[in-house]
Image: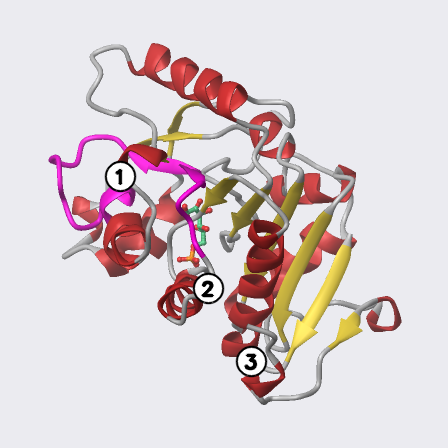
Amino acid sequence: MEIVIAPDAERCSIIVADIITDAIVSGAATLGLATGSSPSGVYTELISRYRKKRLSFAHVHAFLLDEYVGLPTGHPESYAQVIKTQFAEHVDLEPCRVHSPYVKDTDLFEAARRYDTRIAKLGPIDVQILGIGVNGHIGFNEPLSALHSRTRLKTLSEQTRRDNARFFDSIDDVPQHVITQGLGTISEAAHLVLIASGTQKAKAIAAAVEGPLSASCPASILQLHPHATVVLDEAAASQLENAEFYRYIHDHKPSAQRY
Ligand code: F6R
């Protein structure tokens, strides 16, 4: 695992945007997209590069990691809608190339299986962006998810519903269920790129990076992956103990960026 520690969240976003830009310029055609706060600066940076004509997504297929079950179509917090308004509608990524689990199906188990098959058919995903939950989840693979799990229906933990209540009027409005790519599905991407900032993520990051490989911390599967990059600000890295093995970026200036 490559661990990159940057001074702040803004610099983390630029580093991740550089990884995605390099991949697309080299011909990558499938991106895995996460939602939530962690990757939003990455999307802003990619939009800015697209507007400066340094990047095109016209040939890209994008796959969302997960989707809430039970929100009305077009709800602003449904992840398909979040990706549309935060990213896809601002670049040349056609709506038919943005894929997410179909959560209106009467058979959600079958809908999850179909999504897994579609990823396998159009994939493998070249670069998968990941955030991490304070309990170590990636996608919505909550602790004790099977390490080889496929895309499936999951129940959110109380912790995750509390954490995500900030996007809704109250915790009661946060859905109980989601369809999420499984840990096995996520692991098939060629390059996993996890971005995290803030002290609230420090414990989960220490468990994922330096703890044992364990279903108690689903993000620890990155330890098994042949190409995983973890991009952290100093606060998220603050509980790591093996500083000499990590790459520190010291300059605050985004002017060092290549795009
Ligand atoms: C979202 C997702 C989740 C989030 C995680 C962190 O698509 O898959 O794993 O990445 O819950 O969320 P934030 O970034 O809001 O702290």
The residue depicted at 45 percent of the width and 41 percent of the height is 60
* Residue behind mark 2: 42
Circles 3 and 1: CB atoms closer than 8 Å: no
* Residue behind mark 1: 95
Q: Find the residue positioned furthest to the right.
A: 244
Q: Which residues are magenta?
A: 56-81
Residue 137 circle label: none
Callout 3 amino acid: Asp
In the image, 178 versus 226, the foreground residue is: 226
Callout 2 amino acid: Val
Residue 8 circle label: 3
What is the x, y in percent for residue 113? 42, 14
- Earlier in the chain: of badge 3 and badge 1, it is 3
Report if residue 99 is visible in the image: no
Q: Is residue 72 left or right of residue 163?
A: left
- Earlier in the chain: of badge 2 and badge 1, it is 2
Quadrant containing the C terminus in the rendered view: bottom right
What is the x, y in percent for residue 19? 62, 59
Distance of mark 2 from mark 1, alpha carbons?
19 Å
What is the x, y in percent for residue 244? 88, 72
Where, by quadrant of the figure, is residue 215 drawn? top right
Q: Is residue 244 left or right of residue 143?
A: right
Check the image and tell me how it is coloured: secondary structure
Circle 2 — which element? helix
Callout 1 amino acid: Pro
In the image, 147 versus 85, the foreground residue is: 85
- Membership of 34 in magenta stretch: no
Within 10 Å of disc 1 (Cα), the crowding (few <14, some 14-19, many 20+) is few
Within 10 Å of disc 2 (Cα), the crowding (few <14, some 14-19, many 20+) is many
